[in-house]
Image (cartoon, helix red, strand yellow):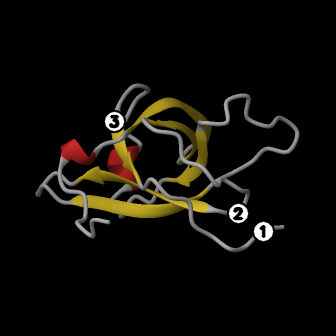
Amino acid sequence: MSTDKPVGANAYNAAIEKIRPVVDGLSIFLIRPDEPITGRLPGYFVSIGLVGDASDQLLRRPYSLIAIIASPPTDPELLELLIIRVPEGGLTPPLFEQSAGDRLYVRPKMLGTYRV
């Protein structure tokens, strides 16, 4: 198993399928990994990332999966993340400039132990 960290845009392994704005600075990102990620449970989280402007380094942050109880996702391979834009943040300002079809990095493993 490789311990190398992904570097550069060639590390991108997922696409943004849809961005649903909720309110200003808060959106639901629907992300489709190139390969399905198994073991998904509510309360688990996944890291996503983009390459920074000033370097070829991948900036990653963890986000919890959301599950809307009233309308479960119709596509089990889509990751649904509720993301708040942090104006001074390193990842969310460029993330909120992305559009459907744009590529990004998704860690290919779910993590978490908290479940309701």
Residue that protrudes farthest toward the top in the picture: 101
List the residue tagged with mark 2: 43
Where residue 17 sits: x, y (%)? Answer: 50, 28
* In the displayed structure image, the side of residue 13 where residue 33 appears, left or right: right
Q: Residue visible at 37% across and 36% down?
A: 98
Q: Earlier in the sequence, mark 3 or mark 2?
A: 2
Pointer 1: residues within 10 angstroms few (<14), some, or many (20+)?
A: few
Which is in the foreground here, disc 1 or disc 3? 1
List the residue tagged with mark 1: 115
- Mark 3 vs mark 2, CA separation in Å: 25 Å
Q: Quadrant of residue 15?
A: top left
Quarter that holds the N terminus:
bottom left
| Pointers 2 and 1 in contact (C-beta within 8 Å) | yes
Amino acid type indicated by mark 3: Arg
Q: Which mark is residue 103?
A: 3
Q: Residue visible at 56% across and 59% down?
A: 110
Amino acid type indicated by mark 1: Arg
* In the displayed structure image, the side of residue 29 where residue 16 appears, left or right: left
Residue that protrudes farthest toward the front in the picture: 1
Q: Earlier in the sequence, mark 1 or mark 3?
A: 3
Examine the rendered structure and indicate whether residue 39 appears above or below residue 96: below
Where residue 36 sits: x, y (%)? Answer: 53, 40
Q: Which mark is residue 85?
A: none
Examine the rendered structure and indicate whether residue 57 appears above or below residue 78: below
Q: Quadrant of residue 65?
A: bottom right
Quarter that holds the C terminus:
bottom right
Residue 23 makes an appearance in the image: no
Q: Secondary structure at mark 1?
A: loop
Q: Earlier in the sequence, mark 2 or mark 1?
A: 2
